[in-house]
Image (spheres, rainbow, N blue to C red):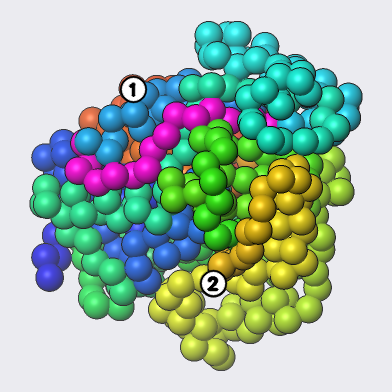
């Protein structure tokens, strides 16, 4: 094993794998350490929407550039990522929701995005066979979708071909510093040295950074997803309505999720970060089903150094695999059949869940940390980081290689929490 690198990346989700690729493409020698497998957690478990619409205004210019990148990515990585530019549609059940979606058109106009509001009739013209009483929807034809399970592995594979070292089954126990600067990482396979360490550890980032004395407010929201048997081809749009969210894959099967509501397990971190998350939680209370029980005790136990999970949390849980909520699977399937009354027989072939890592303002943390030179953070992608993954990787590689980025990322700075400078959750989808 090579023990010296230009940069070490912690985490092999889409953020880390894309960073490894763009660093290697720039001629640097990165080492990526992944405790489990590439894209074992959020990056293979998501819906696969690649959306510009509805995002926080800070994210929109990055996402427009990222959409452009997605268009050439299958060719660039030599793998079919199942990218399709079929648009994205968010449907509203009532006037209040529609007003929020309409309000976002001001952001779209600022960047000349092709977003527009559709009437119920226009929704039914766009998606053949769809039925429902929506008052309208926000639609962006240039949005797309891709197949989550193949994207991060494709980035990692080409990164390796370009000289990156990709180490799976290699947990980083801690980031090592000396004199206020990173010197490398301590892993279960020994110490690795580099002047730059990039934390792309997804749902584990807060825990990893806490070992450096840094407080990253990050909580985990459990999202359940299911896949159906194939059906005749209907649409290439990603659709999110109150009854169901769905994306029809290239083979005709649907990825579906319940249109409203998600599960939140109360854990010790809930108390730790309660103040930071309170405003967002209060505003969106109706969206969360709170659970207090085994997850709290499990998490508490994993924090005590008495347990193996407490001593070596990143080794003890190689792949975070939370349980799918069977009620949400049933609701999603019922929702799909409601909106497509003539769909014919489809059934569920599998279901799964993923823990979404969210920040209080639902935008990522991207960039350096004043207190620790050489440490870069790319995390907190807050439930919409699959679409943004390629640009996140590119920007992190730019920062590591040149010390500056081609887009302004100050809105994503880590220090915004400490400064009390967060602007609240501004995304509408
Ligand atoms: C149910 C669900 C639906 C979603 N739908 C969408 C969608 O439609 N569109 C969209 O854009 N986004 C969506 N997302 C969000 C998206 O999946 C995430 O934002 C994105 O995948 C995050 O990527 P990441 O690389 O930051 O994290 P992850 O993919 O979670 O990767 C982090 C990796 O770091 C590793 N790691 C952590 N700690 C260590 C350590 N100490 N040592 C070594 N390795 C470590 C982990 O094992 C993990 O593999 C969804 C997410 C979920 C869960």
Image coords of residue 276 (percent x, y): 72, 47
Report the disc number at residue 406: 1
Vertical comparison of 296 with 368: above or below: below
Q: Provide the secondary structure element on which disc 2 rests.
A: loop
Comparing labels 1 and 2, the label whose residue is closer to the camera = 2
Q: Quadrant of residue 192?
A: bottom left
Whether 220 is among the magenta residues is no
Asked whether 294 or 308 is in front, the reply is 294
**Mark 1 residue CB less than 8 A from any atom of ligand 1:** no
Q: Going by the image, does 92 lie left or right of 177?
A: right
Q: Is residue 371 in view from this perspective?
A: no
Q: Which is nearer the N-term, disc 1 or disc 2?
A: 2
Report the disc number at residue 234: none
Query: Which residue shows up at 82% across the image and 30% down it?
Result: 134
Whether 81 is among the magenta residues is yes
Q: Going by the image, does 289 lie left or right of 47?
A: right
Query: Which residue shows up at 47% across the image and 38% down it?
Result: 145
Query: Which residue shows up at 11% across the image and 40% down it?
Result: 27
Query: Which residue shows up at 84% across the image and 40% down it?
Result: 283
The tally of labels here is 2
Vertical comparison of 157 with 352: above or below: above
Report the disc number at residue 321: 2
Q: Going by the image, does 349 lie left or right of 106?
A: left
Q: Provide the secondary structure element on which disc 1 rests.
A: loop
The secondary structure that most of the magenta stretch takes on is loop
Asked whether 311 or 230 is in front, the reply is 230
Where are the magenta residues, as a range?
76-90
- Tell me the quarter of the image containing the C terminus: top right
Image coords of residue 383 (percent x, y): 59, 47
């Amino acid at each position: 094993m090579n023990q010296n690198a230009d940069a070490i990346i912690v985490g092999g989700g889409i953020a880390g794998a894309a960073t490894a690729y763009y660093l290697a493409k720039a001629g640097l020698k990165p080492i990526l350490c992944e405790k489990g497998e590439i894209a074992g957690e959020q990056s293979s478990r998501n819906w696969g929407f690649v959306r510009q619409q509805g995002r926080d205004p800070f994210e929109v210019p990055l996402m427009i550039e990222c959409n452009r990148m997605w268009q050439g990515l299958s060719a660039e990585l030599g793998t079919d990522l199942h990218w399709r530019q079929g648009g994205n549609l968010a449907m509203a059940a009532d006037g209040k929701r529609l007003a929020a979606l309409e309000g976002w058109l001001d952001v779209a106009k600022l960047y000349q995005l092709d977003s527009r509001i559709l009437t119920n009739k226009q929704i039914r013209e766009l998606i053949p066979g769809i039925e429902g009483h929506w008052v309208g929807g926000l639609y962006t034809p240039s949005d797309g979708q891709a197949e989550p399970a193949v994207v991060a592995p494709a980035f990692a594979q080409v990164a390796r071909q370009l000289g990156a070292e990709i180490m799976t089954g290699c947990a980083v126990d801690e980031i090592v510093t000396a004199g206020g600067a990173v010197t490398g990482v301590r892993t279960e396979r020994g110490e690795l040295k580099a002047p730059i360490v990039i934390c792309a550890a997804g749902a584990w980032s807060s825990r990893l950074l806490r070992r450096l004395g840094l407080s990253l407010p990050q909580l985990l929201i459990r999202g359940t997803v299911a896949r159906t048997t194939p059906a005749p081809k209907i649409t290439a749009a990603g659709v999110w309505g109150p009854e169901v969210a769905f994306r029809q894959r290239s083979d005709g099967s649907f990825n579906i999720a319940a249109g409203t509501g998600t599960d939140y397990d109360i854990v010790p971190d809930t108390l730790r970060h309660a103040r930071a998350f309170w405003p967002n939680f209060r505003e969106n209370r109706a969206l969360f089903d709170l659970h207090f029980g085994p997850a709290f005790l499990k998490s508490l136990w994993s924090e005590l150094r008495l347990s193996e999970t407490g001593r070596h949390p990143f080794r003890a849980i190689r792949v975070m695999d939370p349980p799918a909520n069977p009620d949400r699977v049933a609701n999603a399937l019922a929702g799909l059949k409601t909106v497509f009354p003539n769909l014919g027989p489809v059934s569920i072939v599998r279901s799964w869940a993923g823990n979404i890592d969210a920040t209080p303002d639902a935008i990522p943390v991207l960039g350096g940390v004043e207190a620790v030179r050489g440490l870069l953070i790319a995390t907190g992608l807050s439930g919409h980081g699959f679409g943004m993954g390629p640009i996140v990787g590119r920007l992190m590689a730019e920062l590591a290689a040149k010390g500056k980025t081609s887009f302004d990322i100050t809105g994503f700075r880590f220090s915004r929490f400490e400064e009390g400078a967060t602007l609240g959750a501004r995304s509408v989808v």
